[in-house]
Amino acid sequence: MPSTEASKETVAQFLKIFSSGDVGKILDVLSDDVTWWVSGRLDGMSGSYDKTGFAQLISGVADVYVDPLKITPISMVAEGDKVAVEADSYAQLKDGRVYNPRCHFLFQVTPDGRIALVHEYLDTQHAKDIFFAG
């Protein structure tokens, strides 16, 4: 199990990479058997994703952004291989709308410093209004 500080550093670096929008680099930090779970009951977004499914999800939404989605941590709490993050997200869409939910993530980090599990909690009504309305 990685140390608490190592886990926090892995997650902090991952969020920087995620905010770059480079899907290949994002996937490099995820373990091959990663599970990324998104809260709620929003068709097309909520549910569990393996690495391939998550790649498809983030590649699809990236096409509607002016610049990559930025995730800015507000606070991080860690114990061992688990890191909880409260964060602000921000992206302007090509049609002028803004996606800017406050999110909460729970990450689990592998001993080799990759992300094995993510639980993502977000405002699904805001996501529905931005990505699925119209």
Image (spheres, rainbow, N blue to C red):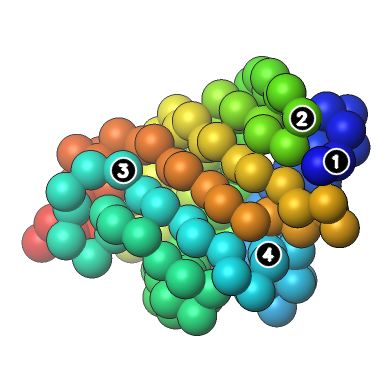
SS under mark 3? loop
Give amino acid for label 1: Pro
- Left or right of 129? Residue 46 is right
Q: Residue at x 46, y 43 (%)?
A: 119
Alpha carbon separation for disc pair 4 and 3: 19 Å
Indicate which label's residue lies in the foreground, 3 or 2: 2
Which numbered tag is attached to residue 30?
A: 4
The answer to the question of whether label 2 and label 1 lie on touching residues, with beta carbons closer than 8 A, is yes
Q: Which residue is mark 2?
A: 80
- Left or right of 34? Residue 56 is left
Which numbered tag is attached to residue 113?
A: none
Of 90 and 102, which appears nearest the observer?
Answer: 102
SS under mark 2? loop
Alpha carbon separation for disc pair 1 and 3: 26 Å
Which numbered tag is attached to residue 2?
A: 1
Q: Which residue is mark 3?
A: 39
Q: Residue at x 61, y 29 (%)?
A: 85
Crowdedness near tag 2: few (<14), some (14–19) or many (≥20) residues, C-alpha within 10 Å: some
